[in-house]
Amino acid sequence: MAGLCGIVGPRDCPLGPLLTEHTRTGETPQSYDSGDVRVGVSTMTDADQPVLATSNVRIWVWGDIHGIQTADGYESRYAADDVPSTPAYCRGLYDRFGLDFLSRVNGTFAVTLYDRQRERFHIATDRLGTHPIYLAETASGAFVFGTDLQALAVYPNIDARFDADALSAFFATAAVPGTQTVFENVTELEPGTTLSYDLETGETTREQYWTLSYRPVDRPFDQVADEFTETVQTVVNDRLRTDERAGVLLSGGSDSRLILAAADDSSVVTYHMNDWMNREARVAERTAETAGVPFSLLQRDDHYPARILDDNAAVMNFYGEFNQGHVTGFLDDIHDEVDLLVTGLYSDWLFKGLSIRRWTIPLGPLGTFQLPWEDAPADADEYVQRCSTELPPYLSASASKSLDEILADGVETGQDGLEYHGVTYPSLRELVSYGECYPMSNDADLFYYGLTQTKRHWTPFLDNRLVDLALTVPVKHLIGPNLVNAAVARLDADLAAIPHASTGVPLSRRYPLDFLQTKVNAFDHLFVRPEHGEKSYHVSGPWMEDGEYIRDTSFVLDTLAESRAVIDALPFLDWEGVVRTYHAHLAGADYSHQLYTLLSFVRMPAVRHLAGVEDGVDAAEMAETEATPVGQLRPTSASTNGELYEHGTDDRHSIARSDGGDDR
């Protein structure tokens, strides 16, 4: 894995086992050992680390830093003819600004610094916590940190114990809120925070140098759209000015299209991931052709989930689902073609009000009519109720609390605002609008973090300049007109004329006409000209329909059976409940997220280690095994004896359907 790890303090805790786990996926790490300070780093660049700054300060960094805000304005790292590596750039910034440079830099990173003269060790996250750092303490008082939560969990000197409430939250939502983790004695460093460890006293202090604070400035939509367009163009061209070969992960929507529209240089290439050449893929291809850039379809085969399961489970930090590490199976296709992957991630969170609930009118099979008015929770209690959902049936009776009780336990009103599971928000407004992805480990999606473990990548919408702008946009401009569409229209009329793949409406169409045409097109797509692939899980969007895939193949069935020893060894999981959950899904209920979260969990190396089950299924053997269509399996009557399947006369596995119905 790429990342940082280290141990500070008593010398009875060796770095070796921790570093071995941090690089279990085959990386070559760099290590440093001065006795009281032991640090390891593994990145996707060949930059030497640590770098030595003035006053004998050593610096390690994982991630990217793009520039710094100074009293004289913004300085870009990429402005130099010879662009320095990220560690070398940090060395120069430390020489100029000291430790204060951390509060000024623009980037997505985790940084550690060792000040040998002052005997101080510092750890810092970026403003949003995109590269999370986990913290623990050994019985002898050693301070242990790492960006790989699984590595800390199996480190011999850390007594990792599962937290029942955090596990319930993880299995229900695929994330653990705030700075909590699934382990009682391991926490996450707060976003935008520098932690300092005094080697003489063993004391730690924290300084939060940035807090997400929403400060809307009322102004017309067109003014906001102009500001957004100009800032996007500046950010994109600042980053793409280097000689690095960039590959844009292109969808049929608007966010990645905006990157192409903003780029002055058309030397990028584009990739689109899909199961087949459906509407989404055709729109992405048309977008690339219109922009005059190469297009490649990265086509998933029917056993793609099986091929990426163990690779993605090995790098997970207990948030998201394995299938969301979308690029993993295509690394061989793109590794030598590009130096940098570019995505449009988090544009919808910052500039489309993704987390803001609207008043809606139900329209039956056409979905809902979203009114341009926010349906805001009255207080934190109502927010918790809205976030709550039922716990999966496979959790044992030891899960004594409901999810709303677990979430409510972490709410506290303080002098600085509203604390939600260890993270302070200035008010309920920030929690409602941004809590879903602040810190980034709140995001129940592996896509972004999975990219940090597969290929160097960049997401322009996480640039400080765009985040700062987003925090000034009034809610009315986030839930009505579309800022991203407006920016594309301002930059490239030809790209804006291409309909959005999911709505069928050109990005140039203005609100509310675009919304009305979306509903007309939804009727057309559902009832007049529906689009289906060869398989039930081949749909018109970019991603596989997981619910149908689980019903139509034996992938989940086989993986659960292979993992029964792990499930039986863990007291909070109930095998009978696993069977009920799987049967209920086959019968028509949607437990796809809960089942994929469970698969992610039981395939994680740390979980298997803690369960005492070290030997997993051979990954190469799994990759060569195609998923078996359920329609070819002999159905049996439902049972409650904990059997997922039984062998039929044709030596294939037969599934016990809870409804006794026909297999799909």
Image: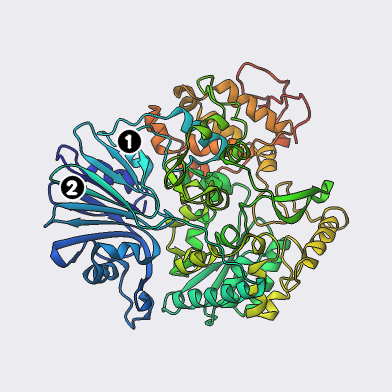
Check disc 2 and give the amino acid type: Asp
300 on left or right of 362? left
On the question of residue 200 being in view, the answer is yes
> What residue do we see at 49% from left, 65% from top?
468
Quadrant of res 529:
bottom right
> What residue do we see at 15% from left, 37% from top?
12
Q: Of the residues under marks 1 and 2, which one precedes in the sequence?
A: 1
Residue extending farthest front: 415
Q: Residue 569 at x, y = what percent?
A: 44, 23
Q: Nearer the viewer, residue 243 or 115?
A: 115
Front: mark 1 or 2: 2
Is 199 located above or below residue 153 in the figure? below
Circle number at residue 294: none
Check disc 1 and give the amino acid type: Val
> What residue do we see at 25% from left, 53% from top?
122
On the question of residue 624 being in view, the answer is no
* Secondary structure of residue under mark 1: helix
Distance of label 1 from label 2 (alpha carbons): 26 Å
Q: Nearer the viewer, residue 413 or 407?
A: 413
523 on left or right of 121? right
Residue extending farthest top: 641
Crowd rating for badge 1 (residues with CA inside 10 Å; few <14, some 14–19, many 20+): some
Q: Residue 461 at x, y = what percent?
A: 52, 65
* Secondary structure of residue under mark 2: strand
> What residue do we see at 39% from left, 34% from top?
183
Which residue is label 2 attached to? 198
Q: Residue 546 at x, y = what percent?
A: 65, 44
Quadrant of res 42:
bottom left
Crowd rating for badge 2 (residues with CA inside 10 Å; few <14, some 14–19, many 20+): some
Which residue is label 1 attached to? 154
